[in-house]
Image: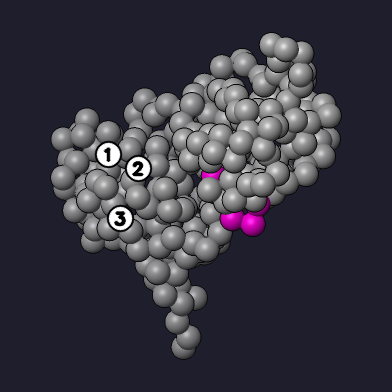
């Protein structure tokens, strides 16, 4: 069993937050939900068949479950294009929409997908459909691999009004751990702390707690702001992040 620990989580206020809270509770932790992201759809979908010269996209890259759901709601489909998804949750959502998923990298990151596609995309038209905060690593890497890359912004990620109670808790030493799921959640946490006049204290509070991040880019962002990172899971999934963070904050013990 584990000792009870207070763990802040910053996922959007939808089923992802519900699932995160349920998971943390099942791990013996006390969830502190504080949504740091909200989704604003742009209404734009990738063009897989009407490029300027009439040539359809050869490959479509989807990077999130949210993006898949928005495209499915819009009645979009990949058509004859090869479909690549950055991780298993995105791929599962795409299959649930009735699409065939051709590529899922072993490493669920932008760099992992670039490595998986390197050597296969030279001379191909590639559509990358994602949020407005996608990593440049993906676009730059595909271009360097010889692809003709176009990006479609499916949705914007913004910080919800009223978010940031966890920053006050961190500043007061009332958090045992946090789970950052993207660089943007780190930045929005710090912006919320700044608004409340507790940024310095909140960072100090995080450095007394256990900080879990979902991957190397998020780690780099956190460390660039003076936040010590304790946990980076082997696979970039929330389930692994939460389990590893809770274990670090309250190691399992046997009577």
- Does the CB distance between marks 3 and 1 fall below 8 Å? no
- In the image shown, does 41 or 148 lie closer to the viewer? 148
Name the secondary structure under disc 3.
loop
On the image, which quarter does residue 77 sit in? top right
Mark 2 vs mark 3, CA separation in Å: 15 Å
The residue beneath circle 3 is: 175
Name the secondary structure under disc 1.
helix
Q: Position of residue 184 (x, y in %)?
A: 40, 37
Q: Residue placed at 49% from the left, 62% from the top?
A: 233
- Does the CB distance between marks 2 and 1 fall below 8 Å? yes
Q: Is residue 109 magenta?
A: yes
Give the number of the disc on residue 186: 2
Give the number of the disc on residue 251: none
Tell me: 113 left or right of 99: left
Name the secondary structure under disc 2.
helix
Please, which residue is most extreme toward the bottom here?
Answer: 255
Q: Give the magenta-colored segment's residue range.
A: 105-110
Comes first in the chain, label 3 or label 1: 3
Please, which residue is most extreme toward the top here?
Answer: 52
The residue beneath circle 1 is: 190
Q: Is residue 39 magenta?
A: no
Can you see residue 180? no
Q: Residue placed at 45% from the left, 82% from the top?
A: 253
Can you see residue 123? yes
């Amino acid at each position: 069993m584990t000792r009870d620990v207070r763990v802040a989580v910053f996922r959007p206020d939808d089923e992802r937050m519900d699932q995160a809270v349920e998971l943390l509770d099942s791990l013996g932790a006390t969830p502190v939900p504080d949504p740091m992201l909200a989704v604003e759809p742009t209404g734009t979908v990738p063009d897989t068949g009407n490029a300027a010269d009439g040539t359809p996209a050869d490959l479509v890259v989807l990077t999130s479950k949210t993006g898949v759901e928005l495209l499915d709601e819009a009645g979009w489909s990949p058509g004859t294009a090869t479909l690549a998804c950055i991780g298993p949750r995105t791929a599962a959502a795409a299959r649930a929409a009735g699409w065939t998923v051709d590529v899922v990298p072993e490493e669920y990151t932008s760099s992992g997908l670039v490595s998986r596609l390197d050597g296969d995309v030279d001379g191909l038209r590639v559509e990358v459909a994602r949020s407005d905060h996608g990593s440049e690593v993906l676009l730059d890497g595909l271009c360097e691999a010889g692809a003709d890359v176009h990006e479609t912004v499916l949705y914007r990620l913004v910080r919800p009004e009223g978010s940031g109670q966890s920053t006050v808790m961190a500043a007061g030493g009332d958090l045992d751990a946090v789970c950052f799921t993207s660089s943007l959640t780190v930045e929005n946490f710090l912006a919320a702390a700044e608004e409340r006049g507790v940024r310095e204290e909140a960072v100090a509070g995080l450095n007394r707690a256990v900080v879990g991040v979902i991957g190397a880019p998020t780690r780099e962002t956190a460390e660039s702001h003076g936040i010590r990172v304790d946990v980076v899971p082997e696979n970039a999934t929330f389930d692994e992040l939460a389990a590893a963070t809770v274990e670090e904050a309250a190691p399992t013990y046997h009577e």
